[in-house]
Image (tube, rainbow, N blue to C red):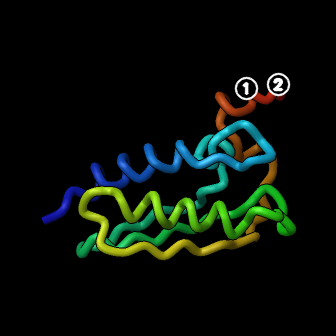
Amino acid sequence: MIDKEKIEADIIAVLQTVHDPEIPVNIWELGLVYEISIGDDGYVNIKMTLTAPGCPVAGDIIMEVDNKVRQVENVSDVNVMLTFDPPWNRDMMSEEAKLELGFL
């Protein structure tokens, strides 16, 4: 049996290494990751968004998320789903991100 809590913690750790090139904060702290679900077989679904629908590096960010999550121990496969519902806004950022960007 796989330890889903450990896998999720490991996934969050790698997501904290993925940055939106236009904003010097990682996608986890920005609140761009809406959902992480892990199947009993290690199949991971990630639902995420971007700061703007027309983000010119959208493909790069999604590919980086996919590649990094695949490297997490006990992950068998990854599906990254991009959504703009609900649209991202600054309120979704962590306190740390807001502080770092000067919003507090």
The residue labelled by disc 1 is: 100
Residue sticking out furthest to the left? 1
Quarter holding the C terminus is: top right
Q: Dot 2 corresponds to which residue? A: 102
Instruction: Classify 71 as above or below 83.
Output: above
76 vs 13, left or right, is left
- Label number found at residue 85: none
Q: Are marks 2 and 1 in contact (CB under 8 Å)?
A: yes
Q: Give above or below for 4 relative to 39.
A: above
Which residue sits at x=66%, y=72%? 82
Task: Residue 13: give x, y in percent of width and height.
Answer: 44, 43
Real-space CA distance between mark 2 and mark 1, rounded to the nearest whole angstrom: 6 Å
| Residue neighbourhood size for the residue with mark 2, other residues' Cα within 10 Å, grouped as few (<14), some (14–19), many (≥20) | few
> Residue drawn at (46%, 72%), measured in percent from left and top?
45
Q: Where the N terminus falls, by quadrant?
A: bottom left
Q: Position of residue 49 (x, y in %)?
A: 69, 63
How busy is the neighbourhood of tag 1: few (under 14 within 10 Å), some, or many (20 plus)?
A: few
Question: Measured from the top left, where is residue 90 in percent x and y?
Answer: 80, 44
Q: Is residue 101 above or below residue 51?
A: above
